[in-house]
Image (spheres, coloured by chain):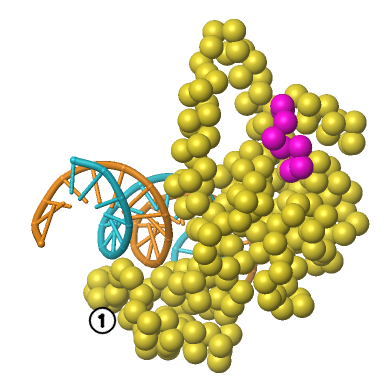
Chain colours: A yellow, B orange, C cyan
Amino acid sequence: MEAKEVKAKLKKGFWKPEEDLILKKYVETHGEGNWTVVAKKSGLVRSAKSCRLRWKNYLRPNIKRGMMSEDERDLIIRLHKLLGNRWSLIAGRLPGRTDNEVKNYWNTHLNKRATRDQIKHLPDSNTEGKREETLETTTTIALMSTREVERLDAVTDTCWVENLTNVDYSMNMPPDYSPFFNTYDTFMPIFDNLVLFGSRADDEIIQETTILI
DNA sequence: AATGGAGGCAACCGCACAGCG
DNA sequence: ACGCTGTGCGGTTGCCTCCAT
């Protein structure tokens, strides 16, 4: 069969419970990854991408579902301020939450609020220059922190982040699940400050960061 | 009870990148 | 250097539910 025909026959749309079960059992038996093989061998008429997404966003163990807590919401806002739309990085700091979930939450709940706030405060001819300056500063911090977070992601010696925020980590996580930063990394305290003081004026943050560096 | 709009969210799409032969 | 494959990411779409009228 032509690849085009195969693709056209693949099922799209919402997953049925029985499909979930098949995928779950297959991944549990054969392990995660190699989604092309999973799609072919599992018996599912789904694309590799679709299987991967379903597993990652829904079936994977330790997925935390339901309402975002106040602390989680807070953390998302702060991290978004620092990192921008780097959903996977932001989600990596929220145990059990997926990038898709964080992205959806931002787009439906927080983005609106942010827009509302912006309208409330801007534009103003007197603050226009200041706003541009602030945006530039935020971008600088975001770039710096993004690079550091990416680098830190490669490091295996990680630690929990209870000291960073009051996010609820009481859910059952495997002992080897450590989504956070390196204990001894030099950037950690700087990033902490960026997150913790993210709600403050950007020039304040940049000053503190400069001192810390 | 019917209906239309808005909001929420799961899933898809297109692109980028890394690894490999 | 190039093409292929697998994977990840962010943006977007479209379906479902809820609620006001």
Task: Check residue A18 for magenta coloring.
Answer: no
Residue interval drawn in magenta: A194-202
Label 1 is placed on what type of residue? Met
Q: In which quarter of the image is the N terminus of chain A?
A: bottom left
Q: Which residue shows up at 58% across the image and 85% down it?
A: A31
Give the x, y percent position of residue A196.
76, 42
Q: Nearer the viewer, residue A110 or A186?
A: A110
Residue A197 colored in magenta in the image: yes
- According to the picture, the residue beneath numbered tag 1 turns out to be A1
| Quadrant the C terminus of chain A occupies | top right
Q: Is residue A88 positioned above or below A10 on the image?
A: above
- Residue A176 in the image: x percent, y percent? 76, 76
Q: Which residue is the extreme one toward the bottom?
A: A29
Callout 1: SS: loop
Q: Where is residue A18 in the image (x, y as percent from the top left)?
A: 37, 86
Mark 1 neighbour density, 10 Å: few (under 14) some (14–19) many (20 or more): few
> Is residue A77 toward the left or the right of residue A187 in the image?
left
**Quick check: A48 left or right of A121?**
left
